[in-house]
Amino acid sequence: MTTQPHRRRRRAVPALAAVGIVLAGSLAGLGPQVSVASSHREAPLIASDPAADNTDLYAFVSPERPGYVNLIANWIPFEEPNGGPNFYPFATDAAYNINVDSDGDAKADAVFRWTFKNIDKRGGKTFLYNNGPVTSFDDKNLLFKQTYTLESSFNGAPFKTRISDAPVAPSRIGAASMPDYQKLRDQATVQLQGGWKLFAGQADDPFFLDLRVFDLLYGGDLSETGQDTLAGYNVNSLAIQVPFKDVALRGDAKRNPVIGVWTTTDRNRVRVTGDTNPKLGRDRVQVSRLGNPLVNEVVVPANLKDAFNSISPDQDAGIPAVVKRVTDPELPKLIQGIYGVPAPKTPRNDLVEIFLTGITTKAGGPIKADLNSQLNNQDVKAKQFRPSEMLRLNLNVPVTAQPNRLGVLAGDLQGFPNGRRLTDDAVDIAVQAVEGAAQAGKLVDALAAGDKVDTNDNTFGASFPYVALPNQGAVNAGRGAGTGKGASTAKANPQAAPAGDDTSSPSLVPTSAEASSGMGSNAILVGAVVGTGTLIAVLAAWWLRRRRATPTALRRDDTVAF
Amino acid sequence: MHSPLRTVSVVSVAAVTLLAVGAVFGLRETPAPAPAPASAQAAAPDRLAETIARAQDRLRTLPRDYQTWATLGLAYVERARVTADPSLYPKAEGALRRSLQVRATDNAGALVGLGALANARHEFAAARAYATDAVRGNPYNADAYGVLADAHTQLGDAGAATAAIQRMLDLRPGLAAYARASYDLEQRGRLAEATGLMRRALAAAVDPADLAFCRNQLGDLAWFAGDLAGAEAEYAAGIAADPSYQPLLRGRARVAAATGRTDAAIADAATVAARTPTPDTLMEYAELLRLAGRTAEADRQLTLADAAHRIFVANGGRDDLTGALLALARGDTASAVKLARSEWRRRPFADVADVLGRALHAAGRDAEALPYARRAVALGPRNASYAYHLATVSLAGGDPAGARAELRRVRDLNPYFSPTDGPTAARALSALEARP
């Protein structure tokens, strides 16, 4: 060591001694610094995500408006009516889409896209939803509301705005606050100049089922049935009614009557370089997807839900098959074990047909009927067809005067799985289908009772948007807007408040009833029934050869103005 | 605290006191008093409590529902995070192991839960292993990537953490992913971008606890940039959203201390320390008490901090970083060095480098301290306290020029970084700049 440092130090010491001592002294009286937390930074892992919480999709031709088709998609299950201090906005950082594939290449030919904005007058000082009765959407007493913009794109053309700043029917919070909810519903139901009808907002959850049916997968049995688990709850609903020509291939529903429909939600892709382009660009991440009912539930054995939520239908055929039991659904074996009903032989190509291609004679499946595959569209070439999971509807099947809740399986060809009407009993149909009823051509008697929930608790409307008004009584205390069968269940409602209206405005904080990482109560919505069938369908698709889609002819947009 | 026996008895009394205090204050659900709104305000929904209650209900009748066992386990881990109650860890573990018992394969949910639990217990290597397994079983599981990202970050694998976070963003962009991406950028010193992402997370937040979390992070980000007014506004907004979220009170205390309102700071710090008695909250409280000259009380809080650490360890946690900080506070530099080194060997993370440097400096081993202090600054270039610690080491090591440069950086980054050391840093800088 040289002497220089010493010398420097000796010279420095007098001037800095005080500083040095001060510095040393403070360290003895330790305090943790801002960045050093002995608990490291812990961020939430499961967070409520209303955009990802989609529940159902319906597609059916209008009974009262010939030539028009209805597409209805719902999000956020288990919305409590005014029994809790909750209201349920759509996410404002996501796009909600209904997609239509008319040529069978598993890519969207028509996309209807909703995006939402908050109008929040609460100023961060209050969390009250309203401060007085709300008699209309524009009432100044409504402190929080949403509006939406609807865009559409046909055959890959850029999106065009059809309407912007349209009203979203608010969460229904009780008769004192909303004495005339029908008026709010009417204000949120609009007709565009081209004839399209639109609705966005809260509604009664139209799905009806006893979720305990799926307890079979977890050691339960079918002894506990008969309660509509969803009775009394609400959902957020998007509904659109368009003429056949706007969704049919080449605008010709006579030649090309079959459409495939699925709903998705997506957000901007974010790069950790910090590039967070807020504009809706091509780079989107799909956070949820739904076609046929009960698909998104947790599926045994693979975690198909996460994969399914991420990929688009045209990727279905390319998923690596990781599941050993892909062609061998668990549910029929459980049913056989408990009820002695023989499980149909595997591989289950009948389920492949129902959910992957549509019921047709042109895909080599065992169900010999031409009902709802794009392969039956005259202008579709077989080689451009690509199997994928979606809800397929034949627009030409005539409207049934007396709809049968068991749909196709009861000879009512207008019902699920040919599209899906609000009154179709998806669970019973699915249970029958997974037991081979579609292939055999007759119902399995031992399971004829299904989940013993045959209708919704509220009556549906006779015209658009058809879904019933939101319930307004607390779930435990009974039903809200309408009448119907099915008792509400207390099972999933630890927060129920006494029934009745709010007399003082509740402090309402937006929430979602579910965590939607797949870990929340969605896990209770297990649906290995149809889900397993779809699992078979989707994961078995590697058997099928890939097809490359040929581009379809461009078609002009209708000009629409509001 | 000078004889072992007395130490034991003091610590055990402290532990009992701690638990008693915790039982009365720390684990209570009701929120701290908030400014009363104009009309009656119903309690904000506690989604985690609902999830737990629902899961418990269901499992009573369906004990073979392995997915709900996993959900319950993960909910317990989340609850432990929000309430800072480590006694939930064993409950979480029980639920998660039960899930695996019912279904040993194809059970990514349970693996993710065990990974999240491992992270919470600072067992980052184990968390990495669980998350890697989960990803192998289900490559589309965003939660697994979240757990993996957290583990990689704390283990010092910055590149791997970024990759995991990007994967999470590509699967499920939303609050959990945005929050981690924001932290990733913050660690790399890109505070403006980190703030932008945290604002995105805030926009996606729905539950009050999530809103509060985002506001807290935004407050901290403003704080790191020396923006006191901004920080104060964010913390206030967070408290309005969820008055029971304790980190916001810590933030508010920090701002109060920086603006000379020591009593207000002590009041908030006391509330936090009572409700969530973890070593860091107790040490912060102790620091403020010492600043106000209440030395005996400060010492008592440090004893409680020790006890809290022991409870954490007893519940299966391992955290030599906290152990090192506590040792430093006691003046036990030998233990501080030993513990900090042990942690460094496990994970070369910025915070650990910083504490190891400080421990070595406190032990008078400045030549050894210097590389660690420098490493901390390299890993966290926008962190004022790392810069300050490097300055002290430089100064003691005979490099006043270096010290002066670092102290200037402290001033430019965030002069309020510590109520105790901030003024010291400012005085030191003046003294150094006054030299010819």
Image: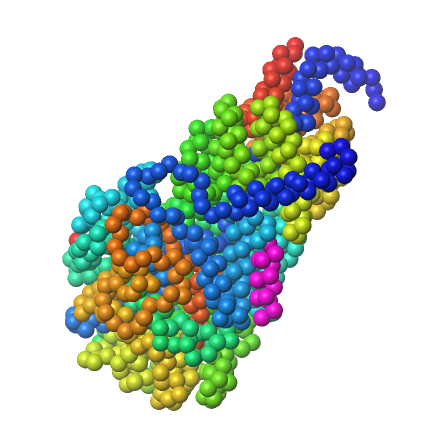
Q: Which quarter of the rendering shows the N terminus of chain B?
A: top right
Quadrant of residue B336 in the image?
top right
Position of A133 with respect to B331 (left or right) is left
Extent of the magenta region: B89-102
The image shows residue B87 at horizontal and vertical percentages of 59, 52
Position of A388 with respect to A484 (left or right) is right
The image shows residue A20 at horizontal and vertical percentages of 69, 19
Residue farthest top in this picture: B436
- Verify whether residue B97 appears in magenta: yes
Residue drawn at 28 percent across, 70 percent down: A457
Of A296 and A317, nearer the camera is: A296
The image shows residue B12 at horizontal and vertical percentages of 68, 42
Position of B296 with respect to A249 (left or right) is right
- Verify whether residue A466 appears in magenta: no
Quadrant of residue A432 in the image?
bottom left
Q: Which quarter of the rendering shows the C terminus of chain B?
A: top right
